[in-house]
Image (cartoon, rainbow, N blue to C red):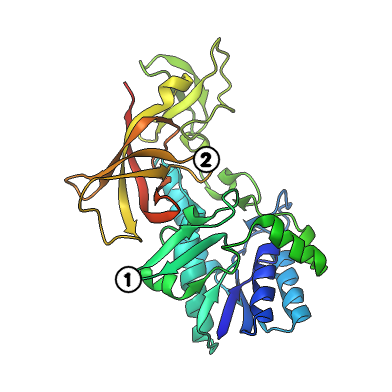
Amino acid sequence: MKVAVGMSGGVDSSVAAWLLKKEGHDVIGITMALWDGDDSIPVRKHACYGPGEKEDVLSAQEFCHRIGIPFHVFDCSKEYKETVLSYFKNEYSAGRTPNPCVKCNHSMKFGLLLSKARQSGLSFDTFATGHYARISRDARQVLRRGKDLKKDQSYFLYRLSQQQLAGTIFPLGNMTKDEVRKIAGENNFPAADIQESQDFYCGDHTELLGIQPRQGVIIDKDGKALGHHSGTWNYTPGQRKGLGISNPVPLYVISTDAEKNTVTAGTKEETLSSSISIADLNWIAIEGLSTPLNLSVKIRSSSKDAAGVLENMPDGKVKITFDSPQSAAAPGQSAVFYNGDIVVGGGVIDKIMKAE
């Protein structure tokens, strides 16, 4: 089988490519060039987007040369700016919390990159990445959590279509991170020592917004002024640091209102929500929700699963009512539904219903 592997220059994609070649597949490495910004910006941390991209591409190229597979780079910077960065800016400007990695996976890595590769004349049967996730194939293509639950990345892949899943394999899905690092170390892969990406951008996200500071008021739930802020886009529900308010009880961001230019803060208990509505849905394990389902949901990539009941709403959205109130649900973030290790589907958090 001829397999195109999405190479990042890191240990996961390197081991994925090596394993596939070892299994006898005809492997080629492909990657996206996204950064077209100022190379004088310091690389403050390793990230998917930033001036450090050149080093990552070079690392991927050298690794592919080392194991004897072709390597191709495709310039996707214009489309990335139009698709991911514009979405990122628009969501923050509207007072919502975006999820650029989810957007990038669906639109760019599993979409545009493959289109550009094939348009260039490359031919391959399937696409592989170093994500920690699994796919089972029956009547539908079903996305599952990776074996290593600490590294599971299914949350970031929930927007993939049936067609995208059908053309994808995840060689690391049944492995742990320790097993992957062991392979890299035993074979002296340079990527074994490369720091993992921690975010999609190397610096402060406000640098990408191009928005002038806009002073507003931080208020409590009753409208009483507590302090001031320089832009609602600097805050997200559940945030504690950066409020700059002295208070006997720790304060957290409850919500932001871009139109009124206010940030509402309160106690930890005041961040709790009893249910959320979810829009812009993508179903994976099922074609759609016909009856209420008892399942679990992740409301952030780093959050623990929360049990609840998922049901349809009259406006085409769905609502999940949590078994116990949850903290820091943020409009704009993704909510991903699970039945055990199966990704049922997911969508974008639209509205928060506060716990009484």
The residues bearing labels 1 and 2 have C-alpha atoms spaced at a distance of: 51 Å
Q: Secondary structure at mark 2?
A: loop
Would residue 82 be seen by someone viewing this image from the given angle? no
Q: Say whether marks 1 and 2 touch (CB < 8 Å).
A: no
**x and y percent of residue 171 in the render?**
59, 69
What residue is rendered at 42% in x and 56% in y?
Answer: 342
Residue highlighted by disc 2: 212
Q: Secondary structure at mark 1?
A: loop
Closer to us: mark 1 or mark 2? 1
What residue is rendered at 54% in x and 57% in y?
Answer: 146
- Asked where in the image residue 141 lies, by quadrant, the reply is bottom left
For the image, the number of numbered tags is 2
Residue extending farthest to the top is 248
Q: Nearer the viewer, residue 18 or 199?
A: 18
> Mark 1 packing: few (<14 Cα in 10 Å), some, or many (20+)?
few
> Mark 2 packing: few (<14 Cα in 10 Å), some, or many (20+)?
few
Q: Amino acid at mark 2?
A: Gln
What residue is rendered at 35% in x and 32% in y?
Answer: 323
Q: Nearer the viewer, residue 334 or 229?
A: 334
Q: Amino acid at mark 1?
A: Ala
Q: Nearer the viewer, residue 119 or 304?
A: 304
Q: Quadrant of the C terminus?
A: top left
**x and y percent of residue 154 in the render?**
49, 56
Q: Nearer the viewer, residue 58 or 70?
A: 70
**x and y percent of residue 252 in the render?**
50, 24
**x and y percent of residue 97 in the render?**
45, 42
Task: Decide: is 152 above or below 267.
Answer: below
Residue highlighted by disc 1: 139
- Asked where in the image residue 67 lies, by quadrant, the reply is bottom right
